[in-house]
Amino acid sequence: MDPAIEVRDLKKTYRTPFARRKVEALSGVSFSVERGTIFGFVGPNGAGKTTTIRTLMGLIKPTAGSAKILGHAVPSRKARAQVGFLPESPYFYDYLTIGELLDLAGRLFGMSHADRKKRSDELIERVGLARARAQSLKKFSKGMLQRAGLAQALMNNPEVVVLDEPMSGLDPIGRKEVRDLILELREKGTTVFFSSHILTDIEAIADRVAIIARGVLTAEGTPAELIRRTALGVDVMVRIAEDAAIDDLVAGADRVRRVGDQLSLTLPVDADVDAWLAKSRERGAKVISVAQRHETLEDLFLRQIANAGGSAEGRV
Ligand SMILES: Nc1ncnc2c1ncn2[C@@H]1O[C@H](COP(=O)(O)OP(=O)(O)O)[C@@H](O)[C@H]1O
Ligand SMILES: [Mg+2]
């Protein structure tokens, strides 16, 4: 089966008409999203997330490369009918009610009156806006508007959902609600592709994560794989006679501490931990603990961005 989303060597250069300046927003981005999975697309502001998503939705044309949704090259009406989309900072006619907004979205997908009514009632409940049914969107808070946007993106019961920063501007409870909704969608077999500039929004729920910085993917994998790349060494602690010679045990190690009969240190990432433990036992040592030392995924993320050259602004 075709992947839900496939992006191959996507490039996009924006040309600003007056300043005669070129901005290379994407410099060859490739990834694919398997069906029924949650894919998190994370990167700082200006990294190229929205440009990638707008290309996927057929709203802008890439300078080079290709994108497919459910096997159809974009833009494709057939693919669009099976995709739900939440744009970044969505704008709605603010004199509408949530019911009217969803009815309008249903009409655009050619749904019957009965289907529109049933589906919008369901979704209004699901995103927790039942009590705001009579209000116009003008009175909605940022969080309520975001939920209205999510409901709108789900109106056509899509197979693939593309959400551009669905958690932006939400408080911690709002962020959790969006995370739960995304997990619920996957349970039903829906594919969810969503972007965020905050890694923790993504690592908790995504099956795969891609990190983008300055228009280039700097890392891609499962959250566990990315975490493995954050290994800093192995912390070991042993009990050893106070007068035992330990020079060869501490050679090459970091953070060496010997307090009484307790010796603790950090072995390098590539150390042979088994061999080290065997050697220490020959010296009469008893193992107390062995644990991997990690940097956080957030540190890895920041390092990837720094390696890619920092901020994406003002680039030619
Ligand atoms: N319409 C546009 N015209 C010119 N430059 C743009 C346009 N849209 C985005 N850019 C630039 O392209 C880069 C990527 O932007 P964007 O895709 O919006 O990033 P993100 O969504 O990750 O914040 C930024 O440097 C941004 O300023
Ligand atoms: Mg964006």
Image: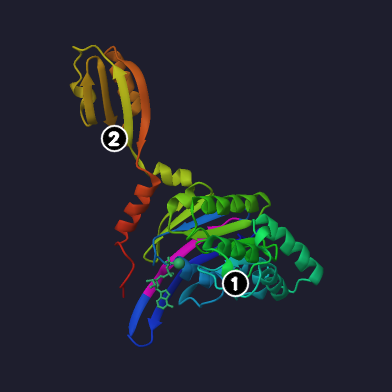
Q: Position of residue 207 (x, y in %)?
A: 54, 49
Asked if disc 1 is less than 8 Å from ligand 1, the answer is: no
- Nearer to us in this view, 2 or 177: 177
Q: Position of residue 133 (x, y in %)?
A: 68, 64
Q: Is residue 37 visible?
A: no
> Magenta segment: does it hold 168?
no
Q: Earlier in the sequence, mark 1 or mark 2?
A: 1
Q: Position of residue 307 (x, y in %)?
A: 30, 57
Mark carried by residue 268: 2
Quarter of the figure that contains the C terminus: bottom left
Main SS of residues in magenta:
strand
How many numbered markers are drawn? 2
Q: Which residue is located at x 77 percent, y 63 percent?
A: 118
Q: Is residue 138 left or right of residue 169?
A: right
Q: Which residues lie in the magenta part? A: 24-34
Q: Position of residue 271 (x, y in %)?
A: 31, 32
Mark carried by residue 73: 1
- Asked which secondary structure carries label 2, the reply is loop
- Nearer to us in this view, 90 or 5: 90
Q: Is residue 298 visible?
A: yes
Rendered position, 218 above or below 232: below
Q: Is residue 10 left or right of residue 57?
A: left
